[in-house]
Image: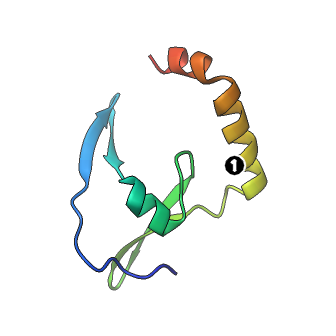
């Protein structure tokens, strides 16, 4: 498990269509060893919440998804509108 943050950090909730997302700064993503496109799980424990990379997505699946997202970036942006 990753070490706890040494200091508190404010995160921003943003509207994403009819849902809400959170903006994670690049520094935090690096510390969590996560990147844009990773699938995460939020786990509640006795000491609070943990954000983990989802076990459902394998590294090979994620690599394939990132490849498609890179090659089809324009099409995916149009579909997201």
Residue at the limit of the structure toward the front, as seen here = 27
**Residue displayed at 61% across by 16% down:** 75
Q: Position of residue 34 (x, y in %)?
A: 53, 59
**Residue displayed at 41% across by 54% down:** 26
Q: Is residue 60 left or right of residue 47?
A: right
What is the secondary structure assignment of the residue under circle 1? helix
Q: Position of residue 40 (x, y in %)?
A: 52, 57
Q: Position of residue 7 (x, y in %)?
A: 24, 76
Instruction: Name the residue carrying label 1.
Output: 62
**Residue displayed at 33% across by 76% down:** 5
User: How many marks are shown on the rendered structure?
Assistant: 1
**Residue displayed at 67% across by 58% down:** 56
Residue 70 found in image quarter: top right
Residue 45 found in image quarter: bottom left
Quarter of the figure that contains the C terminus: top left
Q: Residues within 10 Å of mark 1 (few under 14, many from 20)?
A: some
Task: Specify the color scheme.
Answer: rainbow
Q: Position of residue 11 (x, y in %)?
A: 25, 55
Rendered view: 55 above or below 2: above
Rendered view: 80 above or below 57: above
Rendered view: 17 above or below 75: below
Q: Nearer the viewer, residue 71 or 81?
A: 71
């Amino acid at each position: 498990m990753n070490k706890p943050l040494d200091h508190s950090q404010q995160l921003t909730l943003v509207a994403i269509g009819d849902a809400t997302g959170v903006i994670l700064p690049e520094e935090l993503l690096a510390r969590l060893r996560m990147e844009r496109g990773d699938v995460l799980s939020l786990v509640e424990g006795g000491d609070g919440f943990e954000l983990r990379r989802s076990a459902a997505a394998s590294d090979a699946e994620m690599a394939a998804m990132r490849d498609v997202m890179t090659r089809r970036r324009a099409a995916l942006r149009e579909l997201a509108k």
